Amino acid sequence: MENEGNVVVDIGNSKIKTAIFEGERLVSRFAADHLEEVFQHYNKASYRWIFSSVGDDPSAHSRISALKDHLILSRDTPLPISLDYQTPETLGVDRIAASVGAFHLYKKSCLVIDAGTCITYDLVDKTGVYRGGAIAPGLKMRMKAMSHFTKRLPDVSAEWEEIPLKTQGKTTRECLVTGAFDGVVHEMDGFIEAFLKEYEDLAVILTGGDANYFESKLKAPIFADFDLVLTGLNTILNYNK
């Protein structure tokens, strides 16, 4: 039976994001809360599958193993880039997939900023070597941490979008939002500036669930790509045909 496309599955901290690719073209997306919803949505036997971040759920692995043609992304998976990383067994597969996606699209040195639960900064050089990066607290994590580690500061993580963002906050809630949000912006600008000193012809790609909050706030020109991890997973699956 002829293959009808690639199903790529990115299991994140809060949501499962999936897509169908035909060759290198993304043709449809689907988001789910549970893996079983994904299997019900894509019910054709002729798909090829790739999964990232399946964790240690035995039932998930059992269900995936029953698929005829599938790949689970791990540190042992052959990649179209090489890893210059001292502890590859601890490198998140989402970071690997995003880095592969960026280099596949731009074919040059790339800095990937993934703004999610945590904010990750990952560098792939122009020769296709992953050089490492940084991990920092995400936007809501910063807000929650300020409340958790103090006795009187409130947790504004659930309401922050309703609180005015000001350079000079006039209430404690405004100060918390400004500190967290502008702190992220300045951090991103600082990392971009530092990487640009070492890699002049650098593509900066912003992705992740919170990317839309920051894409218009940064000083340097960037590319916003909300499908970067999915593109990377598809690239890895095609590489492993």
Image (tube, rainbow, N blue to C red):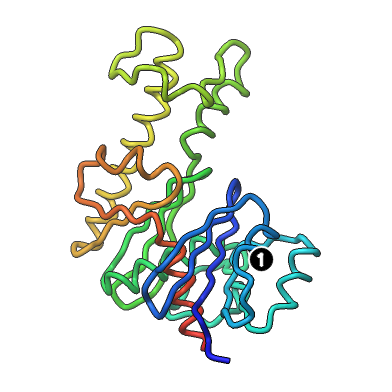
Q: Nearer the viewer, residue 110 or 150?
A: 110
SS under mark 1: helix
Label 1 CA crowd tier, 10 Å (few <14, some 14–19, many 20+): few
Which residue of the protein is positioned furthest toward the bottom in this rendering?
Answer: 1
Q: Position of residue 164 (x, y in %)?
A: 35, 17
Query: Where, quadrant-wise, is the N terminus in this rendering?
Result: bottom right
Q: Nearer the viewer, residue 24 or 136?
A: 24
Q: Is residue 92 above or below residue 193?
A: below
Q: Is residue 127 above or below residue 52?
A: below
Horizontal arrangement in the rendering, residue 117 relative to residue 163 (left or right): right
Q: Position of residue 65 (x, y in %)?
A: 74, 76
Residue at horizontal 57 percent and vertical 27 percent from the top:
144
Q: Is residue 67 above or below residue 181?
A: below
Horizontal arrangement in the rendering, residue 140 relative to residue 200 (left or right): right
Name the kind of residue labelled 1 in the image: Phe
Q: Which residue is mark 1?
A: 39
Q: Position of residue 105 (x, y in %)?
A: 31, 70
Q: Quadrant of residue 109?
A: bottom left
Residue at horizontal 67 percent and vertical 59 percent from the top:
35
Residue at horizontal 55 percent and vertical 61 percent from the top:
10
Q: Nearer the viewer, residue 105 or 83?
A: 105
- Count up the numbered dots: 1
Q: Position of residue 185 (x, y in %)?
A: 32, 36
